[in-house]
Image (tube, grey):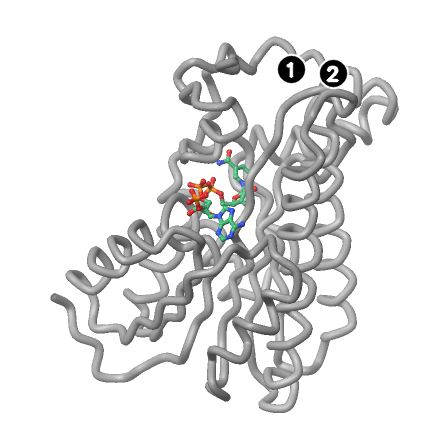
Amino acid sequence: MITTEQKTGLALVTGAASGLGFELSLLLAKDGYDLVLADVDAEKLQQAKLEIAALYASDIQLIIKDLSKCNVAQQIYEALDGKAIDVLINNAGFGIYGSFNDTDWEREAAMLNLHVLTTTHLTKLVLNGMVARNRGKILNMSSLAAFQPGPLMSLYYASKAYILSFSEAIANELKGTGVSVTCLCPGQTNTCFQEVVANGASVSDNKINFNIACPKQVAKYGYEAMQKGKVVAIPGNINKFLSKLPRFLSRKTATAVIRKIQEKNRVCKT
Ligand SMILES: NC(=O)c1ccc[n+]([C@@H]2O[C@H](COP(=O)([O-])OP(=O)(O)OC[C@H]3O[C@@H](n4cnc5c(N)ncnc54)[C@H](OP(=O)(O)O)[C@@H]3O)[C@@H](O)[C@H]2O)c1
């Protein structure tokens, strides 16, 4: 175990049980933060806590909640019991593949609640205290999907565009307050996310099998960008180039290119 003499602060991470949220939690613990970890699956979150606690001396509080439910941000905020949050990472999310005409509304509404409402409300609740203390860091998880429309994953792309726009706007409003907002926009990353989108097919089943990033590297890139107060963080040169696609092509053509990529790439289990 690595002990940390000096505690750095308290960090709240959503979707911390796996993938990027788990990797970001490890980086926070390594830097001496105590953690509040929120996720939907109690067993997976407990396992994540054990793995972090085996390496680092952080105090770790767990909050088991479905973050797609109404008013869950308020419940999380109340569970903090007045503790000041120094870092907020709004990471929990999932994707849905399919033509909008065919996809399941209940699942889509849950995704929109999670990406849009919970992210926004939790930010609002935590931000107040950060501004009053003149310090704080917020990392919102968006995606490369934020930069143009995404046929066959229309609501996922639109919700990630919302997160990017919201984050850039409040980052500007918060200049001079000591609070920074960073929006991380990864491309394909090798986590459970890809299996959820593809209904159980693994990322190795994807037909476009290059430019799939390792979650540890993406988390490290995002974490360092957050610590520097960078507003938009896009890991990887190919992804940086792809984010500019709508500037080189018309928006209509960029949308058509994304449709081709989605059609060709995705292997979904039925
Ligand atoms: N992987 C990629 O290619 C990629 C690319 C760009 C952006 N992202 C974004 O990165 C973020 C993290 O995803 P990841 O790649 O690390 O995938 P992941 O391994 O599936 O991690 C997502 C975590 O969020 C949790 N979660 C999902 N829905 C939740 C809910 N309603 N309430 C509470 N927790 C919930 C998941 O729990 P369960 O597994 O138990 O549902 C899981 O622990 C997401 O916002 C995603 O959109 C991912």
Q: Position of residue 251 (x, y in %)?
A: 86, 27
For the residue pair 180 and 145, the one nearer the viewer reads as 145
For the residue pair 66 and 61, the one nearer the viewer reads as 66
Q: Position of residue 254 (x, y in %)?
A: 79, 22
Verify CB contact (< 8 Å) between mark 2 and mark 1: yes
Q: Position of residue 270 (x, y in %)?
A: 52, 13
Q: Is residue 79 left or right of residue 114?
A: left
- Tag 1: Cα neighbours inside 10 Å, few (<14), some, or many (≥20)? some
* Residue drawn at (24%, 53%) of the image: 47
* Residue drawn at (65%, 11%) of the image: 263
Q: Is residue 63 left or right of residue 178?
A: left
Q: Which image quarter: residue 2?
A: bottom left
* Residue drawn at (62%, 36%) of the image: 240
Q: Which image quarter: residue 192?
A: top left
Q: Is the shortest distance between ligand 1 and the CB of mark 2 under 8 Å? A: no
Q: Amino acid at mark 1?
A: Ile
Q: Which residue is mark 2?
A: 257
Residue 61's place in the image compared with 215, above or below, is: below
Q: Which image quarter: residue 265?
A: top right
- Mark 1 secondary-structure assignment: helix
- Rendered image: mark on residue 72: none
Q: Which residue is mark 1?
A: 261
- Tag 2: Cα neighbours inside 10 Å, few (<14), some, or many (≥20)? some
User: Mark 2 and mark 1: span between their CA atoms?
Assistant: 6 Å
User: Residue placed farthest to the left in the image?
Assistant: 1
For the residue pair 179 and 20, the one nearer the viewer reads as 20
Q: Quadrant of the N terminus?
A: bottom left
Q: Amino acid at mark 2?
A: Val
Residue 55's place in the image compared with 213, above or below, is: below
